[in-house]
Image: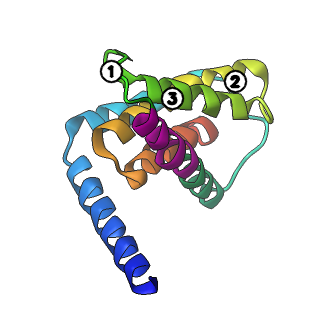
Amino acid sequence: MRDSLIKDLALGLKTQGTRTAQGLKDPRLYGLLLLGGIAWLLPKPLSSLSLGWLLGKAFFEEFIFRFVLQETLSRVLRTRFSIGPIGLSNIVSSAAFSGVHFLHHSPVMAGLTFFPSLVFGYVWDRHGSLALCALVHFFYNFCLFYRPW
């Protein structure tokens, strides 16, 4: 059983690596990264977070909301309901993502997290790469916390 688990883990890591490499060739990904600049229009957060914390937080949140929640919802719901490229599992995951942000953010800022979460969910649906989701999430947070002015 242990050998099977190790083989499954190795296959999963290899698959993630392949999906990440393929996703990095997608020009849409870079357009979605540019959307992170919208964060410069929002009020700068009162607190500051280190780059390592931002990266770890992005990876953890994407693991929970994309790899676990959105993927599970996609398999359970099996619905074709979507609004353009945004599916129902992405919408529900993004609502949950936004809801969790109400714990530590103002209602307006927490509500606004719904929209970037739709982008992260789209990246997941398109590429199935946890690393790409975390990269886009990290970049959006970077734009919010670290500004050129």
Q: Amino acid at mark 3?
A: Pro
The reply, left or right, for residue 25 in relation to residue 142 is: left
- What is the C-alpha distance between the residues marked 1 and 2? 30 Å
Which residue has dot 1 on it?
Answer: 80
Q: Amino acid at mark 1?
A: Arg
Q: Is residue 111 above or below residue 50?
A: above
Q: Quadrant of the C terminus?
A: top right
- Contact check, label 1 and label 2, Cβ < 8 Å: no
The 10 Å Cα crowd at callout 1, few under 14, some 14 to 19, many 20 or more, is few
In magenta, the rendered stretch is 63-76
Under tag 1, what secondary structure?
A: loop
Residue 9 coordinates in the image, percent (x, y): 40, 72
Residue at screen point 65% across, 57% down: 53
In the image, is residue 93 part of the stretch drawn in magenta?
Answer: no
Screen quadrant of the N terminus:
bottom left
- Which residue bears the numbered disc 3? 116
The part of the image, by quadrant, that contains residue 16 is bottom left
The disc at residue 109 is 2
Mark 3 falls on what kind of element?
helix
Q: Mark 2 is on which residue type?
A: Met
Q: Nearer the viewer, residue 83 or 119?
A: 83
N-term mark: 2 or 3: 2
Q: Main secondary structure of the magenta part?
A: helix
**Badges 2 and 3: C-beta atoms under 8 Å apart?**
no
Q: Which residue is at 76% across, 20% downward? A: 107
Q: Residue at x 54, y 41 (%)?
A: 69
